[in-house]
Image (tube, helix red, strand yellow):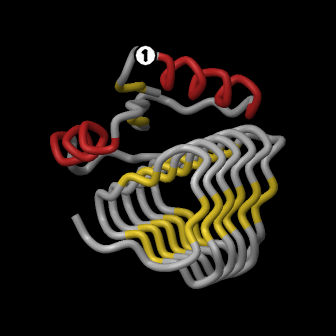
Amino acid sequence: MRIIGSGGHAEVVRDVLTRMGTFYDNSYCFIAVGDNAARKREAEAHPGMIYPVLIDPSAIVSPSAKIGAGTVIMAGAVVQAGAKIGKHVILNSCCSVDHHAIVEDFAHIGPGAHLCGDVVVGEGALVGVGVGLAPGCRISAWHLVKAKGIVVEALPGN
């Protein structure tokens, strides 16, 4: 498999691949770039590639969750029933996405962040380390929610 990216995020993606024990031939590609906007640019620059979903064996993912192409779900992450995860999303270590939450394309849910039920995280948004999003909360596209925040209502757009 071709891996685009060579930084720290790419190293972790390689570790996930090793733990998965799955072999992908050169027809597959994975964009292992941590910056959300840069990951989107790479995806747009490589149309027609086959992007697998990578799920660390220690993650728990509901069979009813929908996971988009090119998404990585890191060690200890939990994705509950009815959740919808877009394309090229990073669900980082030990985060949780509860029932019927939506994480749109190119978003990043940081380590230890927790999304309650019916939350929507917009395209390219970054939910930082340890952030908690209350039920029904909406985060606008490309918005940043800083580390250790607790959000109890919608945040305005950029």
Name the one closer to the observer, 71 or 104: 104
**Left or right: 99 with respect to 51?**
right
* 74 is higher (above) or lower (below) than 1: below
Where residue 106 sits: x, y (%)?
37, 53
Q: Mark 1 belongs to which amino acid?
A: Gly
Q: Residues within 10 Å of mark 1 (few under 14, many from 20)?
A: few
Q: Residue at x 71, y 79 (%)?
A: 99
Where residue 146 sits: x, y (%)?
47, 47
* 14 is higher (above) or lower (below) than 114: above
Where residue 89 sits: x, y (%)?
47, 52
Q: Residue at x 39, y 47 (%)?
A: 50
**How many marks do you count on the picture?**
1
Mark 1, secondary structure of its residue: loop
* 95 is higher (above) or lower (below) than 3: below
Q: Residue at x 44, y 78 (%)?
A: 154
**Left or right: 119 with respect to 80?**
left
- Figure quadrant of residue 14: top right
Q: Residue at x 31, y 74 (%)?
A: 156
Where residue 112 sits: x, y (%)?
70, 45
**Left or right: 62 with respect to 105?**
right
For label 1, the residue is 7
Name the one closer to the observer, 90 or 69: 90
Name the one closer to the observer, 95 or 151: 151
- Figure quadrant of residue 123: bottom left
**Left or right: 156 with respect to 23?**
left
Name the one closer to the observer, 59 or 37: 37
Quarter of the image with the C terminus is: bottom left
